[in-house]
Image (cartoon, grey):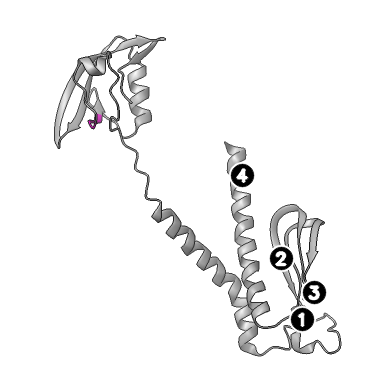
Amino acid sequence: MVILQYILAIVGFSLIIVVHEFGHFIFAKAGRMYVHEFFMGFGPRVFKLKSKAGTEYGLKAIPVGGYVKIMGMDRNEEIPEGMENQSYQGKPFYKKFLTIFAGAGFNVIFAIILIAVFLSMGVYKPNTTIDYVQPGTPAESYGFNTGDMVTAINGEKIRTWDTFAAETQKRPGEKVVYTIIRDGREITIEAVLDEVEGRGYLGIS
């Protein structure tokens, strides 16, 4: 789990960088600046493709981050004769400003898109609502119904199905008092649990 968290953190960080650099790239192209390279990752090159416009696109050995190289961004770069008007330094202030600002701007847009996607998927709310009552089990015998929501076990509040399952399984053969909400009313049901493989079993899911 810890390793997965590190991997997700690295992937997320890399995605932020790539989106940031892509913003610079798009506005540099829109401003008719010459772009030498647009690469993902760092280290040795493992793949590259050169466009008709002369820009190299590719992937490097360590797929973390990325960068864009725009002609003239480095003040010490020698600009080939006749290409001065395609360099970053040769462009008017507003184009240079937009190219620089676009990196952060694209990160903001990307964040808004992600938020919109997550909101459209809905917010997960853990619940303990019964979807199914297994025939021939204590749940059926003691009157549990589909749609009942379990809110407490032996007076102890529960909020997730995992907690419900854990509290039930550790009471094989015991009488357990379940508090449930049914049709907007709170009721209690006392049920003696079955024992299955050493665990308490009620028979609902």
- Image mark for residue 110: none
Q: Are marks 3 and 4 in contact (CB under 8 Å)?
A: no
Q: Are marks 1 and 4 in contact (CB under 8 Å)?
A: no
Image depth: mark 2 or mark 4 in front:
2
User: In the shown orientation, is residue 203 left or right of residue 24?
Assistant: left
Sequence-wise, which precedes: disc 1 or disc 2?
2
Reply yes or no: does residue 186 show up in magenta.
Answer: no
Q: Are marks 3 and 2 in contact (CB under 8 Å)?
A: no
Image depth: mark 3 or mark 2 in front:
3
The quarter of the rendered structure image containing the C terminus is: top left
Reply yes or no: does residue 149 show up in magenta.
Answer: yes
Sequence-wise, which precedes: disc 3 or disc 4?
4
Between the residue at mark 1 and the residue at mark 2, the CA separation in whole angstroms equals 15 Å
Q: Are marks 2 and 4 in contact (CB under 8 Å)?
A: no
Q: What amino acid is found at the position of numbered circle 4 in the picture?
A: Tyr
Sequence-wise, which precedes: disc 3 or disc 2?
3
**Tag 4, which secondary structure?**
helix
Q: What amino acid is found at the position of numbered circle 3 in the picture?
A: Gly
**Tag 1, which secondary structure?**
loop
Q: What amino acid is found at the position of numbered circle 1 in the picture?
A: Gly
Between the residue at mark 3 and the residue at mark 4, the CA separation in whole angstroms equals 37 Å
- Image mark for residue 6: 4
Residue on which the image places disc 1: 72
Residue on which the image places disc 2: 67
Sequence-wise, which precedes: disc 1 or disc 3?
3
**Span colored in magenta:** 147-151
User: In the shown orientation, is residue 4 left or right of residue 200?
Assistant: right
Which class describes the residues within 10 Å of circle 3: few (<14), some (14-19), or many (20+)? few
User: In the shown orientation, is residue 199 left or right of residue 82?
Assistant: left
Residue on which the image places disc 3: 54
Residue depicted at 37% across the width and 50% down the height: 122
Residue depicted at 75% across the width and 89% down the height: 85
